[in-house]
Image (tube, rainbow, N blue to C red):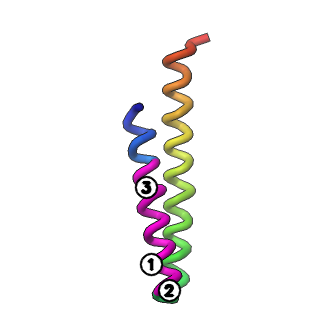
Amino acid sequence: MNKDQVKGRMNEAKGKAKELAGKMTGKTSTEMKGKAEQVAGRTQSSYGDTKENLKKNPK
């Protein structure tokens, strides 16, 4: 596991928490920021997954 995978998954989790907090408090902006953070985290972890796969299978 590389740093991009770890950071990405952490950002996904933080985004999910932020989204839920926004839903509970009724703050749409917080909810949307959480969703955006989740997408960014998912993208970063996918990038890390790709890097890891290329290391294992360089062909």
Q: Which residue carries the number 2 mark? A: 27
Could you tell me the amino acid type at mark 3?
A: Asn
What is the CA distance from the residue labelled 1 to the residue labelled 2?
Answer: 8 Å
Residue 48 horizontal/vertical position (percent): 49, 35
Mark 1 or mark 2: name the one nearer the start of the chain. Answer: 1
The residue that appears at 44% across and 58% down in the rendered structure is 13
Contact, CB < 8 Å: mark 1 with mark 2?
yes
Q: Which residue carries the number 1 mark? A: 21
Please state the extent of the stretch shown in magenta in the rendering: 9-24
Q: Find out whether residue 11 is within the magenta segment.
A: yes
Q: Which is closer to the viewer, label 1 or label 3? A: 1
Secondary element at tag 3 = helix
Could you tell me the amino acid type at mark 1?
A: Ala
Above or below, 57 against 25 in this view is above
Q: Badge 1: how crowded within 10 Å, few (<14), some, or many (20+)?
A: some
Residue 43 horizontal/vertical position (percent): 56, 47
Could you tell me the amino acid type at mark 2?
A: Lys
Q: Which is closer to the viewer, label 1 or label 2? A: 1
Q: Which residue carries the number 3 mark? A: 11
Above or below, 34 against 25 in this view is above
Q: What type of secondary structure mainly makes up the magenta span? A: helix
- For residue 50, the mark is none
